[in-house]
Image (tube, grey):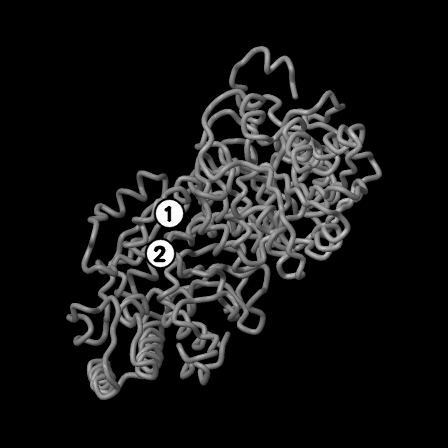
Amino acid sequence: MSGAAMEAGRTLAMGQDEALGGGRRSVEAPFGRALARLGHSHPDIVGLTADLGKYTDILPFRDAFPDRFFNVGMAEQNLVAVAAGLARTGKVPFATTYGVFATRRAYDFVAIALAHSNLNVKIVAGLPGLTTGYGGTHQAIEDLALMRMIPGLTIIDPCDATEIEAATTAIAEHRGPVYIRLLRGSVPVVFEPGYRFEIGKARRLREGSDVGIISTGFMTERALDAAEALHKQGISAGVLHVPTIKPFDAEAVAEFAASVSHIVTAENHVVVGGLASLVVESLFDAGLLKTVTRIGLPDRYIECGAVPTLQAKYGLTTEAVIATIAALG
Amino acid sequence: MLRNSPPGSADIGALERKARRLRRHMLTMARGQGQGYIGQGLGIADALAALYFHELRYDPHNPAWPDRDRFLLSTGHYSIALWAALAEAGIIPVEELVTYGADSSRLEMSTLDTTPGVEMIGGSLGHGMGQGVGQALGLRIDRSDARVFVELSDGEMQEGSTWEAAMSASHFKLDGLVALIDCNGIQADGPVVLDMEPVADKWRAFGWETFEIDGNDMTAVVGALAGARQRNGKPKAIVLRTLPGKGVPRIETSEKSHFFRIDVAQWDGIIAEFEKSAGAQP
């Protein structure tokens, strides 16, 4: 967590570093840089935004390819509809806005205009879960649950800058509609350069026999740090990172769950309908009925406040993961 | 019609005959299914005849030809009219029309995009204009001079997404985009649930070059389409004043013209009435 922001005790402004790292190296605008690079080798890629270009890191692409970039103004339904039309002419649109607007506001368009026709559009959704202090209007705490229900939609919740870059390339080359959660600004680097991202594949990042942490998004960073700290306390915790929410790697989850005594899920999302639900459903299907301890946001709207304060209050910190696992006994 | 240049002078009589053929197809489909959005279909038949047999550039043997002009039917429930036009244009077989609305038929009562010649799924209203904007932008990137025609209805203008799209079309100066607004004065809950007038002024205020015509007057329809061909930096809106059920007096005057469900014997009466009013004309 950022000590400076904590000391200041203020709500971070939009556009500031809100996906907080733990003193790690970070990369500025990994999505926008990756997209700008891809633009050279993929002339069909077009960029779109709905008056949030500055705040969704897509400006490097706009600057490199001004003729392939469109800002449709504050109109998220139109953002998705225009992207659908572009896809029908063979383009590969990357449309950015905040997660709350891409989901709650444009849901019918994502479902019918995009997914029903399996169009090749990538929705890039800023401010996932609790990465802004702007309260319920801006915190996309239920986006994974909403998007999961849309048939044929691929859903990705990356952990760090390395994975954002890799996933941006992967979805550009994947044919079909994708929803990806965007960590923006100065994004921590957790994974080494050799880290491989593959759509639909979970990755076992750490072995452990006592507890198995199944995590997605930035919670994997917390899970890895917690596992390291727990190791010093004599608790062996494994970590399975599940960056693709759909299609869900149920096989890897079942295999991982079978190898540990306790299962803990960790997600930057409400504990209803997201990773925790997916894990429980997949374990039920596999006949593995184990207790699952869920770390995630409660089923309620979150208030305004400083991001570090809110993340600490709602348990999205390394310390909270350590405490939860230590309490399992 | 496979063309590479703007159409020449129209044969109004021939287009009126095409419109009658479309209406005849629609009545046959509605009789087979016993129901349908026949009022809307009959009302827009003249515009579809003018589009498919005079204005649009397409290859019936290659419906996905990249340089085709696009026709997006935003009101998916008007599918009965689109199936008639696609059949008459040679994109789908005329014999298939009898399957309209039947189980496992691809000629659904609301369009899906799995049938050749269909450019979008149009059942959820307010989707067409935005998708038309996107297609027009894509064609511009490709330096194609193909145009995009989007049909929408007066009731559909109540969906706010229509206006989001209208704003963006003029902002992007999409002069190859043409809106065909079917103003028939009916919607699901009855005539004009919300007053949408003045329709033409609204589009003009959003930066569109606007034409307002009798949508059942073939000469006027052809004239407005010709006017909409100029590439002057503005998208075009053609406000079509249409009569629901046009060509069949019993439907024209029906209070339930939004959705028409009657028995087969009554359909036979309606078809006889249509043939009588059309005279011995083809």
Inspect this view and state whether residue B202 appears. Answer: yes
- The residue where tag 1 is placed is B162
Residue A57, x across and y down, in percent: 62, 30
Q: Residue at x 56, y 23 (%)?
A: A307
Gap between marks 2 and 1 measured at Cα: 9 Å
Q: Nearer the viewer, residue A148 or B10?
A: A148
Quadrant location of residue A320?
Answer: top right
Name the subunit of mark 2. Answer: B
Q: Residue at x 48, y 49 (%)?
A: A81
In this rendering, the answer to whether B215 lies above or below A30 is below
Residue A196, x across and y down, in percent: 80, 44
Q: Nearer the viewer, residue B280 or A198?
A: A198
For the C terminus of chain B, give its image quadrant. Answer: bottom left
Earlier residue among tags 2 and 1: 2
Name the subunit of mark 1. Answer: B
Residue A309, x across and y down, in percent: 55, 21
Label 2 amino acid? Leu
Q: Residue at x 52, y 68 (%)?
A: B114
Q: Tell me the number on the disc at residue A147.
A: none
Q: Secondary structure at mark 1?
A: helix
The reply to whether the C-beta atoms of the residues labelled 2 and 1 are less than 8 Å apart is: yes
User: Is B263 left or right of A51, judged from the image as shown?
Assistant: left
Q: Tell me the number on the disc at residue B152.
A: 2
User: Is B264 left or right of B91, judged from the image as shown?
Assistant: left
Q: Nearer the viewer, residue A238 or B244?
A: A238
Inspect this view and state whether residue B141 appears. Answer: no
Residue B237, x across and y down, in percent: 35, 50
Q: How many marks are shown on the rendered structure?
A: 2
User: Is B37 left or right of B58, judged from the image as shown?
Assistant: left
Label 1 amino acid? Thr
Q: Residue at x 26, y 86 (%)?
A: B264
Q: Nearer the viewer, residue B133 or A113?
A: A113
